[in-house]
Amino acid sequence: MLMFDSIAQQKFDALTDNQQAEVVDFIMFLSEKSKPVEDKKDFPFDVFAGDMVYMANDFDETPDCFKEYV
């Protein structure tokens, strides 16, 4: 790994300041992606967690106030 570290450091040092900032941003992005995703089932306001309780009989009908646009 020492050889890789040396090569990586040389390549990094040869970049401009803006390019170095992009590399650091990309490394941070990759490190965030590698973290395990937390289970979101504990969200207290999850309206889609259970079965659908109610849907109006006229759900698919266009409301009167929008009929001129349809």
Image (cartoon, grey):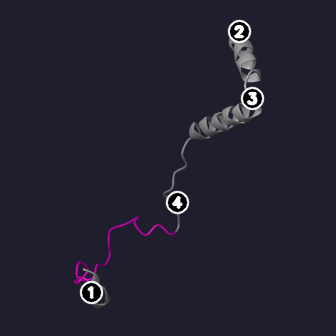
Residue at image point 50% right, 69% down: 45
Instruction: Give how far apart the Cα atoms at labels 1 and 3 are.
Output: 58 Å
As drawn, the label of residue 42 is 4
Q: Which of marks 3 and 4 is nearer the N terminus?
A: 3
Q: Which amino acid does label 3 sit on?
A: Thr
Frontmost of labels 2 and 3 is 3
Q: Which of 48 and 3 is in front in this view?
A: 3
Does residue 50 lie above or below 70 as drawn?
above
Instruction: Give how far apart the Cα atoms at labels 1 and 2 are.
Output: 71 Å
Q: Which of marks 1 and 3 is nearer the N terminus?
A: 3
User: Quick one: SS at disc 4?
Assistant: loop
The crowd level at tag 2 (other Cα within 10 Å; few <14, some 14-19, many 20+) is few
Instruction: Give how far apart the Cα atoms at labels 4 and 2 are.
Output: 46 Å
Residue at image point 65% right, 33% down: 27
Do callouts 1 and 3 mark residues in contact (Cβ within 8 Å)? Answer: no
Quarter of the image where one finds residue 50: bottom left
Do callouts 3 and 4 mark residues in contact (Cβ within 8 Å)? Answer: no
On the picture, is 45 further left or further right than 22?
Answer: left
Q: What residue type is labelled 4?
A: Asp
User: Quick one: SS at disc 2?
Assistant: helix
Residue that numbered label 1 is attached to: 68
Q: Which of marks 2 and 3 is nearer the N terminus?
A: 2
Residue that numbered label 2 is attached to: 3
The crowd level at tag 1 (other Cα within 10 Å; few <14, some 14-19, many 20+) is few
